[in-house]
Amino acid sequence: MDKIMNDYLEKIGKHLKPMSTPERIDIVKEIKSVMLELQHNGVSSEQIIERLGNPKELAKAYLGEAISKNSTFSWRKFGAVFAFCSSFAGVSGIFVLPIISTLSIALMSSGVITPIGGIIKFIGYLMGHDIAGITFEFGAFTATRPMQYLPISIVSGVLMFLLGKVLWKLTMKYIHAISQKKIKL
Amino acid sequence: MNVEDWKSQIKRGTLDFCILLLIKQRPYYGYEIISKLEQYPIIAAKENTIYPLLRRLLKEEYISSSWQDSTEGLPPRKYYTITEKGNEYLNAMSLEWDNLLTAISEIKGS
C-alpha cells in the first residue's frame, strides 16, 4: 500500500461520511482489497487509481445506489436522501432535494392524518359530541354540516397522499439521474 | 442514431441479472465478477459500477457476503453468495428474459 493508494482510500472514506461507520469501513476494506489484488497482478498504483476513477464519483455512486433503485418510500431512504445532499452540495444538494423530499413526506403524512381527523369528528358527532379541536377549512369555506366531514377529509387526504407520492418518485428519479451522470457505463 | 446510448441502457438493465446468474453458480468476489464480465464487451463494467451495485443487491438481500482470508500474501476477499430471495428474483428475471428473446425472434421472423 503506497501513498497514492492510501490517499485514495482516505478520500473515499471522507466522502462516505454520511453512511454508518461499519458500512463505510466495509466499503473501504473492499476497495483496498481490489487495489491489492490489482497490484498483485502487476498493475501500477497510477493505473489502479485511474481505473477506479475519481474517489468522489465512486463515493457518489455508492450513496446514489443506496437510495434510488426503486422509488418506494422508507425512513431509511429519507435519511439517505439527506446524507446524499449533505455530501454533494450545489444548488440541488442544499436547496431542491431537501425541500421536495420534506414536502413530499409532509404531504403523505397529512394525507393519512386528515381522514383520521374526519373519522374522529364524525364518530364524535354520532355520539352526540362536537369535537371543536378538529375543523375543516379550505380558504373561505368551512365545513359546518357533520355529513361533510367524512367525504371531505377522505378526498383531500387521498389527494395529498397521492401528490406526496408523486413528489417522492420525482425525488428518487432526480437523485438517480445525478448520481449516474458522471459514471459512463 | 446512437447505438452507444442504447448499449449502455441494455447494460444497465441486465447487469443485476448477469451478476446474479454468476453468483448462483458459486461464490464470487468482486474483482472476479469484474474480470468475468470484462470478457464480454456488451456487459463489461468497471469497479465504480459493480461495487456500488453489489452493495445495493446486498441491502436488498438478494445476495449475502462474507470476508475470507486468501493465501500467499493476497488480501482478504469479500465473497458474495445468492440468497433465497435472490434466487426468486433471478427466476423471475429468467422467465422475463426468455419472453423477451422469444418475442424478438418472432418479430424478426424466421
Image: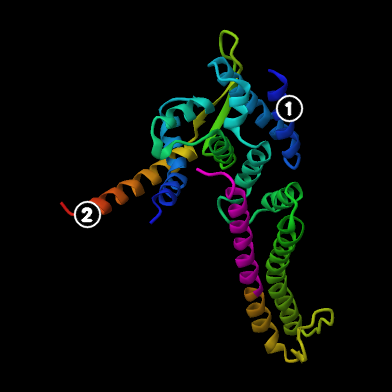
Of all chains, the one bearing label 2 is B
What residue lies at 27% left-to-right and 54% top-to-bottom? B103
Residue B36 in the figure: left or right of residue B52: left
Q: How is the image coloured?
A: rainbow
Quadrant of res B21: top left
The residue at which mark 2 appears reads as: B108
Which of label 1 and label 2 is nearer to you?
Answer: 1
The residue at which mark 1 appears reads as: A7
- Is residue B16 or residue A149 the one in the foreground? B16
- Is residue A94 or residue B88 the one in the foreground? A94
| Label 2 SS | helix
Q: Is residue A179 magenta?
A: yes
Vertical comparison of A1 with B105: above or below: above
Residue A85 in the figure: left or right of residue A180: right
Vertical comparison of A102 with A54: above or below: below
Residue A171, how many percent across, how many down? 64, 60
| Label 1 SS | helix
- Is residue A146 or residue A90 the one in the foreground? A90
What residue lies at 59% left-to-right and 47% top-to-bottom? A182
Tell me how far mark 1 sits from mark 2, CA to CA: 53 Å
